[in-house]
Image (spheres, grey):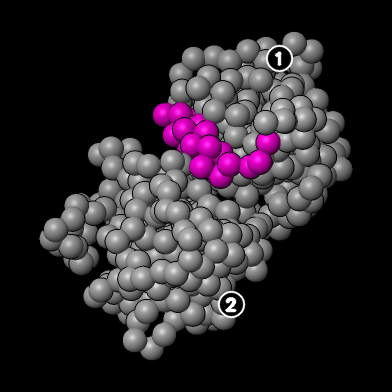
Amino acid sequence: MPERDPLVAPPFDQGVFLLHYNRGREAFQEARYAEARRELENAQRLRPDDADVLNLLGLVYFKTNAFPEAEVIYRRLAQENPNVFILHSNLGLILFKQGKLDESEQYLLRAIELRPNYAKSHLYLGLLYRQRRKFSAALEHLRFAGAEKIVREVEAEMRPQGSVPAASPIQPIRRETKVTTQKIVPLAPARTGEVKPLMTQPGRVPMPAGAPVTMPDTALTAARKLQDAVDETQLAEEKRLDLAHKIEGASKTFTLHENGFLEINFGRSVHVKRGTVSSYSGNLKFVAESGLLGTTAQTLVKAVGQGKIFVYEKGRKTFLLDLNEEFIYVEGSNLLALEDTLTYRVEPIYDSTYQRKIDTVKIFGKGSLAISTHIEPLTLRVTREYPLSISSNALVAWTGNVIPAVMDDKSLENVMIENADEAGFKIRFEGDGVVVSEQ
C-alpha cells in the first residue's frame, strides 16, 4: 500500500472535528481553559478557516491573557467580516489590554459606528479615554454604558486636588479637554437584561508591560473592570434563515410524500434518525457519529454509499428546510435527516444553576434537512421590543440574531405549559429572529 504524501492533507473527518470542538466548548464554559485551548487548536487544524472555532479560540486566548495570540485571530476575523460589530469591539478590547491605545480607539469607534447602542464598546472606550485623562469624552461613553460607579470615580479625578465636593447636588468643576470623537446619538433606555453593566471582579490583573499609565490606581481599576469584559456572543452577522417562508421544502435530495414518508436519494452519504428507516435500496453502511455522543442528537446515524432510503416516524409531523449558506439551530431530538453538504455541531444551552442543558445543533451551509415534531409547530417572531419566553420542552428550532438565556423564575411554574414526563426549564430569547415551538 503506497504511503500518503506528507504534503497532502488527510481527508476531513467531521466526527473527529466535532469531538474536539464540543470538548473545547464545554471546557471553555466550565473555565478549564488549558483543556479548551488544546481541543480548539486541534479543531482548528482540521478546519483552519472555521469562524466559530476561531472566535471561541480567541476568547480562550483572552481569558488566559494570551493577548498577542488573541489579537492575531481577531484581526483576521475583523478583516474578513468588516461589518460585524462584536469583532471590532473585542479586538479593540484586546488591543487596549496590550496598551495599543491608538489602534484600540479606532476599532472601538468602528464598533460603535456599526452598533451605536452596544454598551460594552462604550465602556471600553470610556476606560480608554479615562486612562488618557480625556475625562469629558470618558464620561460621555461611561454614562451611556451605565457604569455609574466609574463615572463617579472619573468625576472625583477631575476635581482639583484638595477640593471638597459641595453637599448640594452641584456639578463639580471639570477640566475640559478638547477631543474629536464620534457624537453619541441619545437612544431610548435599554430593556432590562439587554445590556448589563460589567461587575468588578475580585483580585487584580496587572496591565501588560509597555501600557501607558497616567495614574496607577486608574490603570488597576481599568484592568479589574476588563477582567471579564470580553463578549462571548457568537458571530452575529451570519446569513439567517427566514423560517416563516422556508418550512415548505424544495429539496432535490429529500421528497416528502403525502402519506408522511420521507424519501431520500443520495450519492455519498446522509444522516438519518435511528429507528426511522422503513426501507432502503443500495449497498449502504450505517455508522454512528462520534461527535454527537452524549447529546440528544446522538440518535442520528450516517448512511454511507449510494442509494435510496424511506424514513417514517410514527406519530410525528415532518417538515423540510433548505439552507442556502444560512444557519439554523435545531433541538437534537427533533432532527430527522440531514444532507451531507451541511456542517453541524452541538451547541447546548446550559442551565448552570441546576446543572441542566438542552442540546441544540447548529446547522449551516447549503443543503437540506428534515425536522419532525409531535404537533403542527408555531413560528414565533422575536424582536428587540418583544423578547420571547418558552419552555425548553417546547423548543424545536431558532434562527437569527437572537441570544437564548435560561430563566430562573419560580412564579412561572404554574403559568406556563409543562410536559409532566420531562423536567424542563424556561428559555428567554432576545434580539431579532424566529423561534419554532411545538407548544
Q: Is residue 363 left or right of residue 112?
A: left
Please check the rendered image and state whether residue 27 is part of the magenta-colored stretch, yes or no: yes
Q: Are marks 2 and 1 in contact (CB under 8 Å)?
A: no
Given residues 182 and 361, the one toward you in this image is 361
Question: Image point 42% across, 61% down: which residue?
Answer: 272
Q: Quadrant of the N terminus?
A: top right
Q: Residues within 10 Å of mark 2 (few under 14, many from 20)?
A: few
Q: Quadrant of residue 313?
A: bottom left
User: Looking at the rendering, in which quadrant would you find the C terminus?
Assistant: bottom left
**Residue 7: % across, % down:** 80, 30
| Residue 88 visible in the picture | yes
Closer to viewer: mark 2 or mark 1: 2
Magenta part of the chain:
10-30
Q: Nearer the viewer, residue 337 or 99?
A: 337
Report crowding for label 1: few under 14, some 14 to 19, many 20 or more residues within 10 A (C-alpha). some
Q: What's the residue at 51%, 67% (across, down)?
A: 307
Residue type indicated by callout 2: Lys
Q: Earlier in the sequence, mark 2 or mark 1?
A: 1
Residue 186 in the image: x percent, y percent?
66, 58
Q: Amino acid at mark 1?
A: Pro
Q: CA distance from mark 2 to mark 1?
A: 56 Å
Relative horizontal placement of residue 361, taking residue 218 as reference (left or right) = left
Q: Is 384 left or right of 128, judged from the image as shown?
A: left
Res. 227 image quadrant: top right
Where 193 falls versus 338 (above or below)?
above
In this figure, which residue is indicated by the disc labeled 1?
208
Residue ranking furthest to the bottom: 258
Q: Is residue 38 magenta?
A: no
Name the residue that disc number 2 marks.
Answer: 252
Residue 419: x percent and y percent?
18, 62
